[in-house]
Image: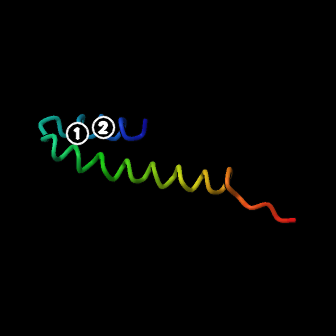
Amino acid sequence: MVTSGAVLLFRHYRPTASPAVETLVLVPSFALVTLVRFTVLRMVVFRRRHR
């Protein structure tokens, strides 16, 4: 959803941009979503329980 939003927002501001330029927007947004997903999973699902 974030990556789609980034591309749609980019298309709104740069409607004549090439697909290559759209890719330059898509890749960092995908990387950011992956990093956030990894962090949340590590903090919530895979956290160590102290005894």
Residue 21: image tag: none
- Which residue reaches farthest bottom? 51
Q: Which residue is mark 2?
A: 9
Q: Residues within 10 Å of mark 1 (few under 14, many from 20)?
A: few
Q: Nearer the viewer, residue 38 or 22?
A: 38
Q: Residues within 10 Å of mark 2 (few under 14, many from 20)?
A: few
Q: In the image, what residue type sits under mark 2?
A: Leu
- The percent coordinates of residue 28 (x first, y second) are 33, 53
Mark-to-mark CA distance, 1 and 2: 7 Å
50 is higher (above) or lower (below) than 7: below
Q: Nearer the viewer, residue 35 or 49?
A: 49
- The percent coordinates of residue 50 (x first, y second) are 82, 65
Q: Which residue is mark 1?
A: 13
48 is higher (above) or lower (below) than 13: below
Residue 14, image quadrant:
top left
Q: How many marks?
A: 2
Residue 1, image quadrant:
top left
48 is higher (above) or lower (below) than 22: below
Q: Secondary structure at mark 1?
A: helix
Q: Nearer the viewer, residue 45 or 40?
A: 45
Q: Secondary structure at mark 2?
A: helix
- The percent coordinates of residue 27 (x first, y second) are 30, 50
